[in-house]
Amino acid sequence: MAPAVAFDDRGRGEPVVLVHAFPLDRRMWQPVVAELSTARFITPDIRGFGAAPLGAPWSVDDAADDLAALLDRLHLPRATLGGLSMGGYIAMAFARRHPDRLAGLILADTRMGADTAEARAGRDRAIAQIADRGVHSYVEEFVPKLAVTAKAREYALAIATLQTPTAIAAALAALRDRPDAAEGLAVLRVPVLVMVGAKDELTPPAEAQKITAAVPGAQYVEIPEAGHLACLDAPGAFAHAIKNFMRSCG
């Protein structure tokens, strides 16, 4: 197992771990964390992304266990865990595998269902495209679909083009093979915030509403004028929602 050893740790107070989207890294969270000063924010790189080692092929369960190991390293018995897109899949796996380490859960622009056969085939085509034509060909086609503002698209693309083909291909395989998360969410007994960009076409508001309905007492926030990377399209609104959630958690 290769724990996530690359991370930023900023602020003081209740710990909040934020897990980045595919195919980005922890730098994705900088605009949001800059807006926040009410808690301690820990932003790790997931296997192979940013400065984190890739190691062997991995699953979302492996990435969830990496986060538990990171909490151990930081001597944190529990934390609020947030994830966007791929980060949400990993956060849901963490909630299933390490429920006693969870103080709260933030799920943004993600879905609880496993990939359909069509989606799995799409992941395989993407892996083949990366092997045949390289990272730039893939991310320049995929990443602009994730954001609605030019600034967010530019920032996301700058991060994505720094990732390696092996890291992106390994993550695509992990996302393709992830399990359905509905059963694990239904038994959660911690505060949960579900967020989504109103213009998210990859995991639209209907998917976020399914998660909200599946989790007892979950809060739902829809961010206007934001796409799949809501934290980059509207970092202020995204941070405000986290502030309100942490306040409501006491």
Image (tube, rainbow, N blue to C red):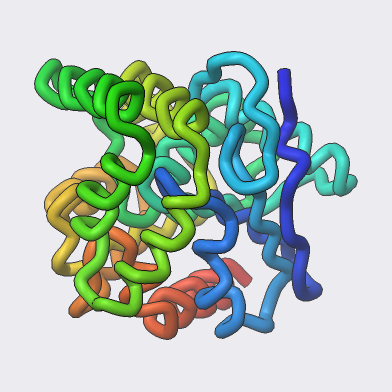
The reply, left or right, for residue 166 in relation to residue 196 is right
| Quadrant housing residue 113 | top left
- Measuring 14% from the left and 66% from the top, which residue is drawn there? 199
| Quadrant housing residue 49 | top right
Is residue 62 positioned above or below 140 on the image? above
Is residue 84 positioned above or below 128 on the image? below
The reply, left or right, for residue 235 in relation to residue 67 is left
The reply, left or right, for residue 222 in relation to residue 20 is left
Is residue 151 positioned above or below 174 on the image? below
* Residue 148 x, y percent position in the rendering: 20, 71
- Measuring 30% from the left and 54% from the top, which residue is drawn there? 109
* Residue 28 x, y percent position in the rendering: 50, 62
Is residue 131 positioned above or below 20 on the image? above
Regarding residue 45, the answer to whether it shows in the image is yes
* Residue 11 x, y percent position in the rendering: 77, 74
- Measuring 61% from the left and 47% from the top, which residue is drawn there? 50
Q: How many marks overall?
A: 0
Regarding residue 114, the answer to whether it shows in the image is no
Which quadrant, please, contains the C terminus? bottom right
Question: Toward the viewer: 227 or 211?
Answer: 227
The reply, left or right, for residue 170 in relation to residue 204 is right
* Residue 91 x, y percent position in the rendering: 50, 40
- Measuring 60% from the left and 81% from the top, which residue is drawn there? 34
Question: Toward the viewer: 8 or 185?
Answer: 8
Which quadrant, please, contains the N terminus? top right
| Quadrant housing residue 172 | top left
